[in-house]
Amino acid sequence: MFVLFAFTCLVIAIFSGYFGINTYIQDFISINHYLAAIIYTFIFIVLTSFSFSVSVMTSVGTLFFSAWEIIFYSMIGIMGSSIVDFYISRKLGRDYVKNYIEKRGGKIEKFDKIIEKDTFKTIMILSAIFFIPPTIPNFLGGVIKIDLKKYFIATFLGNVPNTILTVYLVNGFLYSNTTQIYLSITGLVLVTLTSLYFYSGEIKDILRLSFPWVFRN
């Protein structure tokens, strides 16, 4: 999965360059840098608020902005979409979130005991697991007993490592840096495994939520 995101971005880079799209976008960014950043961040928030991949958006942005810029813009996008989802789930309520999770093959009850113990840790850890759709912790955040400030901090801390490592991975592919590729993949795996350790009893349910099509009969 980690390599797939980077490979997707390389394909985009090759074909966009072939059709001249890459050059056009680069020219636009060089002339309207801050406007381009605002447009990118806005698109990031809109798409990822409705389950589009955060990693793909971050990877695509890496093609057009510097590493530190895209980390900054991506984190704004991630936090923006997380707040949107937080308020959507808070407005629509627990039944909406329960139905959303059950449609993906999971059970919200699986998280209840853990959530009641430490809501901050729940949001942070679920946000740090690379393959979990961001809408899962975001929607859970809206229906559990956690205030917006703690939710915001937990979401931020959970997403920072994977955002940095995703940018590092894509840059490794773009500049053919094998060491960088291996280090970033190792980092993503370690962050995910460390996070999953705290949910060892719920791994199957987490996998169902993340890859519902695999568990369909």
Image (cartoon, rainbow, N blue to C red):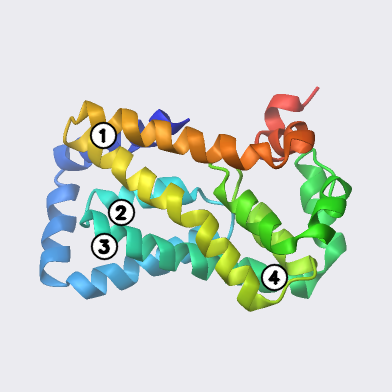
Determine which residue is flagged by label 2. 61
Q: Secondary structure at mark 3?
A: helix
Q: Calculate the distance from the C-alpha at mark 3 to the C-alpha at mark 1.
A: 19 Å
Determine which residue is flagged by label 1. 180
- Mark 2 or 1: the one toward you: 1
**Pointer 3 with pointer 2, Cβ within 8 A:** no
Q: Secondary structure at mark 1?
A: helix
Whether residue 61 can be seen here: yes
- Mark 4 or 1: the one toward you: 1
How packed mark 1 is, by other alpha carbons closer than 10 Å (few <14, some 14-19, many 20 or more), is some
Three-letter amino acid code of the residue under disc 2: Gly
The image position of residue 210, as x and y in percent, is 65, 39
Whether residue 15 can be seen here: no
Q: Residue at x 65, y 76 (%)?
A: 148
Q: Is residue 179 above or below residue 155?
A: above
Three-letter amino acid code of the residue under disc 3: Glu
The image position of residue 199, as x and y in percent, is 72, 40
The image position of residue 19, as x and y in percent, is 17, 41
- Mark 3 or 4: the one toward you: 3
Q: Calculate the distance from the C-alpha at mark 3 to the C-alpha at mark 4.
A: 29 Å
